Image (cartoon, rainbow, N blue to C red):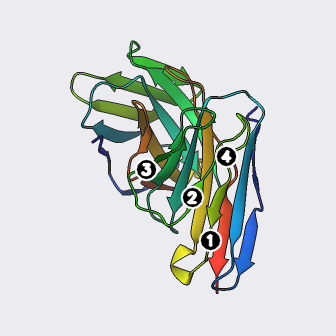
Amino acid sequence: EADIYQTPRYLVIGTGKKITLECSQTMGHDKMYWYQQDPGMELHLIHYSYGVNSTEKGDLSSESTVSRIRTEHFPLTLESARPSHTSQYLCASKRGGYTEAFFGQGTRLTVV
Amino acid sequence: KQEVTQIPAALSVPEGENLVLNCSFTDSAIYNLQWFRQDPGKGLTSLLLIQSSQREQTSGRLNASLDKSSGRSTLYIAASQPGDSATYLCAAYTDKLIFGTGTRLQVFP
């Protein structure tokens, strides 16, 4: 059973608002990832972390930022939301090496 | 830069058929390859994980194979059912987990 949680599941917010999407895991995994997925489209890696105080940008440029102050927590922040940020955001975690990755249920963000 | 491609992009078959979904990756220095299922509007469910030293893994009606040297993995679904309808994604792990473009499967009764 995967213990990785994302909140909120759904969010509708106005343009210009600051938002933080939460991702938490209780498995002690070092590696965590954020993906962006538009409806019917592929997953794009936007941020990842190898552990506490480690953050890297992914292959898709994103205006969001992340932090990793605690092992279990990897929040994603948009300082000023725009309609182009409307998408589904998926969080994942895994141990290093040859192990399985687990995903949260996702946050569906709509910016109006 | 790792690139992962899946073919076919979409597949529609009658119930009971055996299916083959293909995944190819450009960087063979992977730790493992993982297959996922995604239902519309939902998150990802892990189906099978193949470590780089393995050649195949089986779970129920699913069998996944891995040929690292040629950069290919195959997901075989036996005796397909309408409940198998979903998008199937493969992901290759080096230091990052990179996803393929997905195969959208529809199995009709």
Q: Mark 1 or mark 4, which has the lower sequence index? A: 4
* Residue drawn at 24 percent across, 37 percent down: B26
The residue singled out by tag 1 in the image is A79
* Real-space CA distance between mark 3 and mark 2, rounded to the nearest whole angstrom: 11 Å
Look at label 1 and name its amino acid: Glu
The label shown at residue A58 is 3
Image quarter (top left, top right, bottom left or bottom right) of the N terminus of chain A: top right
Residue B40 visible to an observer of this rendering: no
Amino acid at the residue labelled 2: Thr
Point out residue B61 in the picture as x, y percentages from the top left corner: 55, 30
Q: Name the residue under label 4.
A: A74
Mark 2 or mark 4, which has the lower sequence index?
2
Whether the residues at callouts 2 and 1 have beta carbons within 8 Å, the answer is yes
**Mark 4 or mark 3, which is nearer the start of the sequence?**
3
Residue at the spot 58% in from the left edge and 25% down from the top edge: B59
Residue at the left extreme? Answer: B70
The answer to which quarter of the image holds residue A21 is: bottom right
Left or right placement of residue A35 versus residue B19 in this view:
right
A84 shown above or below A52? below
Q: Are marks 1 and 4 in contact (CB under 8 Å)?
A: no
Q: In the image, are marks 3 and 1 on the same chain?
A: yes
The CA span between labels 2 and 1 is: 8 Å
Q: Residue at x 52, y 22 (%)?
A: B58
